[in-house]
Amino acid sequence: MVERTEAPDPRWTAVDHYIADQLLGDEPALAGALRANASAGLPDIDVAPAQGRMLHLFVRMTRARRVLEIGTLGGYSAIELARALPEGGRLVTLEVDPHHAATAQANIARAGLGDRVEVRVGPAADTLRALDGPFDLIFIDADKPSNVTYLREALRLSRPGTTIVVDNVIREGGVLDADSGDDRIRGTRALFDAVAAEPRLTATAIQTVGVKKWDGFLLAVMAG
C-alpha cells in the first residue's frame, strides 16, 4: 500500500476494523505473517486486511488457476491469493529483495501453502521476461516508476479474460499532480496513460480509504 506519512482518519480505521471483525474472522496465518514481517524489519506497506480478502475473492470470482503477483514483500497478499486457488492452482510471486523473499517464503510455508506458491527473487523486469503465460489474474504491487514496464509484461502474459489489478494508484490524490517530482506519482500517471491507450483493456480505478489512508486500485480485463 501507499507509504503513510500521517495517521489515517480514525473513522476510516474504525470502519476497516469493523469490516475485519464482522467479515474476515480470526486469521492466525495472516496475523502471524504481519508479526513476522514486523520482527524482520519489513516496511508496514502490506495490503489492508479487507483488500487482501478482496484479492482472494477476485481469484475465486475469475476462477483463476494461474496467478502472478509482482511485489511479494512478506507474503501477506500472496497467502490470500494462494488460498483462493483451486486444486492444482499455482501462484508465482516476484520479489526483488532477498530478505523480503525469505520472510515471505517462511510465512507462506507456515500457512501451509508452500506447494502452490513459487517465490522468484530478482528485479521483476528481469524475472518477468523468464515467465511464460498465460496467467488468469495478475496483481501488480511493486515499485511504481516501473508500472508501465510491468503492465507491458502483464499484457504479454495475459489471455482473453485475464484480470489485471494494480495497487496504489491514487496516492493520496497525488495522481492529479501532472507536475509532480515524485517518481512514484509519475509512474502511476504513466500507467493510467498506458491503460487508456491500450484497446485490449477495459478498465476502471477505485478510490479507497481505511487503515492505509487514501489510495486505490486499478482494475482491468483483457478483451476476448
Image: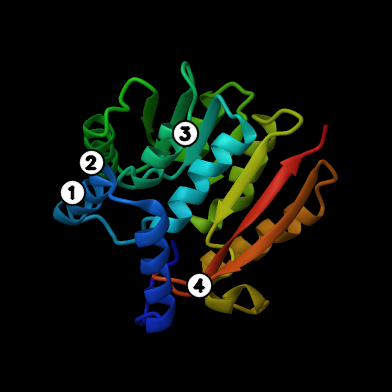
Q: Position of residue 144 (x, y in %)?
A: 52, 57
**Marks 1 and 3, how far apart in space?**
22 Å
Q: Residues within 10 Å of mark 3 (few under 14, many from 20)?
A: many
- The three-letter code of the residue at mark 3 reads Ala
Q: Residues within 10 Å of mark 2 (few under 14, many from 20)?
A: many
In the foreground, 82 or 152 = 82
Q: Is residue 141 visible?
A: no
Q: Residue at x 34, y 61 (%)?
A: 21
Label 4 belongs to which residue? 209
Q: Are marks 1 and 3 in contact (CB under 8 Å)?
A: no
Query: Circle 2 — which element?
Result: helix
In the displayed structure, does residue 149 sit left or right of residue 110? right
Q: Residue at x 64, y 24 (%)?
A: 134
Q: Residue at x 21, y 33 (%)?
A: 110
**Marks 3 and 2, how far apart in space?**
21 Å
Q: Position of residue 128 (x, y in %)?
A: 53, 32
Among all residues in the image, which is located at the extreme right? 199
- The three-letter code of the residue at mark 1 reads Ala
Q: Are marks 1 and 2 in contact (CB under 8 Å)?
A: yes
Query: Circle 1 — which element?
Result: helix
Query: Circle 4 — which element?
Result: loop
Q: Residues within 10 Å of mark 1 (few under 14, many from 20)?
A: some
Question: Counting residues from the N terminus, which is met first, the one under dot 1 or under dot 2?
Answer: 1
Against 207, is 155 above or below?
A: above
Label 3 belongs to which residue? 84
Tell me the mark number nearer the camera, choosing from 4 and 1: 4
- The three-letter code of the residue at mark 4 reads Val
Question: Counting residues from the N terminus, which is met first, the one under dot 4 or under dot 1?
Answer: 1
Q: Position of residue 207 (x, y in %)?
A: 60, 69
- The three-letter code of the residue at mark 2 reads Thr
Tell me the mark number nearer the camera, choosing from 1 and 2: 1
Q: How many marks?
A: 4
